[in-house]
Amino acid sequence: MSLPRGHVLFTTAILAAALAAVAAGILTWVIHGRRPAEPDLPQDYRHLVNPLPQDGVTRNNGMRIVLNKGCAACHGAHADGRGPAAKKLTPAPADFATGTVLQEHSDAWLFWRISEGKHGTAMPRWDGVLTEKERWEVISFLRSLQE
Ligand code: HEC
C-alpha cells in the first residue's frame, strides 16, 4: 500500500508530538513526585545526643508535649500524621506510627528539625516554644513508637 508522501509526513509528525508529550509527562512526574534532596545536618547539631534517661518519665513527658503543645493538630493524637489540620497540607505531616522518618534519621537530625522547622513544609520551628529538654523528651517519645 502506498500513501501520499504528505500523509506519511503528517502521521510521523503527530506520532513524534505524541511521544514528546508522553516523555514530558513522565519527566514532570519524576521531578515533582520526588521530594527535594534533604540538606546536610548543620554542623552545630551533628554532635548532639539525647542527654535524658530513656525511661517512662521522659517518654510520658514527651507524649504530653505532643498532645498538648500543638504537634497533634497536624501529626495526630496517634502520631500517624492524621491530625485535624493535616488534610489541607502538602506534604502531609510526617507519620511516625507507620512512616519511615524515624528509621531514616538520627536523634540529632530530629532535634534540628523540631528546633528549626522544615523549610518548604508546614512544619514550624519550636526553638522559641519548647525548651531543649522538652524537645529531647518529644524525641524520646517518638523513638518509643518504633519499639
Ligand atoms: C502546622 C502543622 C504541624 C505542626 C503543628 C507540627 N508539625 Fe511536624 N511536620 C509537619 C509537616 C508538614 C512535616 C513535613 C513532612 C514531610 O516533609 O514529609 C513535618 C515533619 C516533622 C518531622 C520530620 C522532619 C523531617 O526531617 O522530615 C518531625 C520530627 C516533626 N514534624 C515533629 C513535630 C513535633 C515534635 C511537633 C510539635 C512540637 C510538630 N512536628 C508540629 C507539620 C506540623
Image: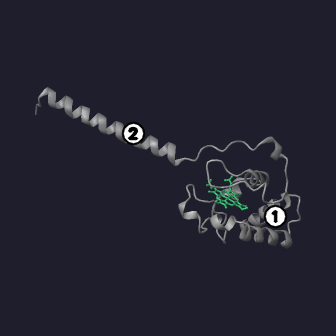
Query: In the image, is residue 77 above or below residue 117?
Result: below
Image quarter hosting the N terminus: top left
Identify the residue under disc 2. 23
In this rendering, does residue 31 appear at all?
yes
Image quarter hosting the C terminus: bottom right
| Foreground of the two, 60 or 8 | 60
Check disc 2 and give the amino acid type: Ala
Image location of residue 81, percent across then percent down: 62, 64
Q: CA distance from mark 1 to mark 2?
A: 48 Å
Horizontal arrangement in the rendering, residue 114 relative to residue 91 (left or right): right
Q: Badge 1 local density, few (<14 within 10 Å), some, or many (20+)?
A: many
Check disc 1 and give the amino acid type: Glu
Identify the residue under disc 1. 137
Query: In the image, is residue 23 above or below residue 91?
Result: above
Instruction: Tell me: is circle 1 under 8 Å from ligand 1.
Output: no
Depth-wise, is mark 1 or mark 2 nearer the camera? 1
Count the marks: how many? 2
Could you say which quadrant of the image residue 72 lies in?
Answer: bottom right
